[in-house]
Image (cartoon, rainbow, N blue to C red):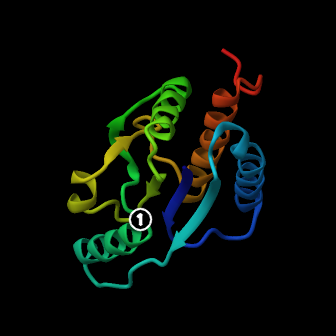
Amino acid sequence: MRLVLLAVGQMKDGPERELLRRYMGRSQAAARAVGISGVLDVEIEESSARSAAQRKHEEAASLLSKVPAGARVIVLDEKGRSLSSTSLAETIGKARDDGLPACCFIIGGADGLSPELLSRSETLSFGSATFPHQLVRVLMAEQIYRIITILAGHPYHRV
């Protein structure tokens, strides 16, 4: 199984990009030991459509085109459910054990996610606060690394 972080927009150079690279690199290095074949960070170009609804629709189509058939799709949304890191690791571990080809974590663009994408995905929230897009990518990359270390029984995650 692969873990894929799909996000609308390009990450700018700076400390956030460096943190993203660091967590994705750590994840990739530790993944095989827990039965995860790869960890990918995929950027989708922002839509230039005039209306927010059209932008969300176009971005959803681009995002879904990168999702492997049979993959579990989890979108980050402020109205999503909050899960502990341990619960999220259990969810991913079960998907791996069930033989799913991938689990995709999706971060939408500035206008949010289309209703079509939301209706065919599970939702996850980092709480009711609003965070900058680049910071959310770093937070999700860290959670991916944390999931892998929890599955590995590594002491990175302390309760």
Residue at x-position 60% and y-position 39% = 143
Say left or right for 111 vs 84. left
Which residue ends up furthest to the top in the rendered image?
159
Residue 10, position as x, y percentages in the image: 58, 73
The structure residue drawn at horizontal position 72% and vertical position 51%, both measured from the top left corner, is 28
Query: Helix, strand or loop at disc 1?
Result: loop
Residue drawn where x is 48% and y is 25% of the image: 87
Quarter the C terminus occupies: top right
**Viewer-closest of 16 and 97:** 97
Residue 75 is situated, as x and y percent measured from the top left of the image, at 39, 50
Residue 29 as seen in the image, left or right of residue 60:
right
Instruction: Return the residue nearer the eye: 110 or 94.
Output: 94
Q: Quadrant of residue 66?
A: bottom left
Whole-percent x and y of residue 136?
A: 55, 50
User: Against 58, is 116 above or below?
Assistant: above
Residue of label 1: 110
Q: Residues within 10 Å of mark 1 (few under 14, many from 20)?
A: some
Q: Measuring 27% from the left and 59% from the top, which residue is drawn there? A: 117
Q: Does residue 30 sit above or below 69 in this rendering?
A: above
- Identified by mark 1, the residue type is Ala
Residue 114 position in % (x across, y down):
26, 63
Height in image: 58 above or below 106?
below
Counting the numbered discs, the total is: 1
Q: Is residue 65 left or right of residue 9?
A: left
Location of residue 34 with respect to 20 vertically, above or below: above
